[in-house]
Image (tube, rainbow, N blue to C red):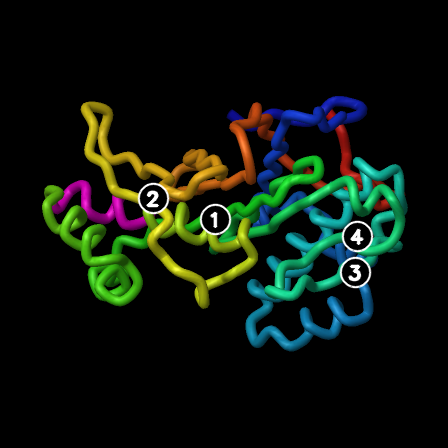
Amino acid sequence: MWSLPQEHVDLGENEVHLWSTQMDDAGLCVECCRNLLSSEERERALRFRFETDRRRYIVAHGALRSILASYMNANPADLQFSIGSNGKPKLALGPAAEKFEFNLSHSHAVSLLAVIHGREIGVDVEHVREDFPFEEVAERFFTPKEVIALRALSSRLQREAFYKCWTSKEAFLKAKGTGLSGELDEVEIVLTDEGVQIKGTVPNWCLIQFDPCDGYVGAVVVEGHACEIKCYRWEGLNTQGSHRHS
């Protein structure tokens, strides 16, 4: 599913590019990523109590800057971001910044970045934990209809259904910029011959589910009609701070 980028990656008008980063990859240059961060991002990284969390934050945000800069032919360290009225990060300054929309998600050791032209987008990734008490979370955040649908599934399918439903909800809320303060009734749990599927119920928004890698579940939501999805693996930085190519 995930391929290494070629010399230059062009983002088509009807494409979504998904970038996956393995944040614990020992081959990644953490210091190279740190050099791209703003002073505010570096200060935030220092506030993490554990070194693993600090490293993951630095790598995820270094990758974010490197990838976005490659589309804009800009210096990654020069990128500036603003926060929208609903707390959603956006590129700031210049006509190129207005052209691209993006969303970042990370869980455990994996981060996902989604990029698109001029349409709202949300992405979510979750590490599937066997010890996570998903029933309690579902009771609190799922609609009564969704809870009933979840309980009707076999125990083998319930955990899978929860994570697919949760990531889809999160992707919807991030795309719309509402976060967990918004309504959580954007999806419906459906059992098909192929297994559990999550159906988007919001008009004029497109939901795509996928498995980024073993042990993880992901979802991306795009404003408007469906797009072609292209998936790339971010493998680190070269000495100029741009992402390396195969």
Q: Which residue is disc 4 drawn over?
A: 32
Residue at 61% over, 49% down: 103
The stretch in magenta equals 155-164
Of marks 1 and 4, which one's residue comes earlier in the chain?
4
Would you say the residues marked 2 and 4 are in contact, meaning their CB atoms lie under 8 Å apart? no
Q: Which element carries disc 3, helix, strand or loop?
A: loop
Amino acid carrying mark 3 in the image:
Leu
Q: Position of residue 207 (x, y in %)?
A: 44, 37
- Front of the two marks 1 and 3: 1
CA–CA distance in space, label 4 to label 3: 9 Å
Q: Which secondary structure is most common in the magenta stretch?
A: helix
Checking the image for residue 58, the label placed there is: none
Q: Position of residue 69 (x, y in %)?
A: 81, 43
CA–CA distance in space, label 1 to label 4: 30 Å
Q: Position of residue 159 (x, y in %)?
A: 23, 48
Q: Position of residue 240 (x, y in %)?
A: 89, 43
- Front of the two marks 1 and 2: 1
Q: Is residue 242 inside the magenta stretch?
A: no
Amino acid carrying mark 4 in the image:
Cys
Q: Which element carries disc 4, helix, strand or loop?
A: helix
Amino acid carrying mark 2 in the image:
Lys
In the image, residue 44 sits, relative to residue 164, either above or below, namely below
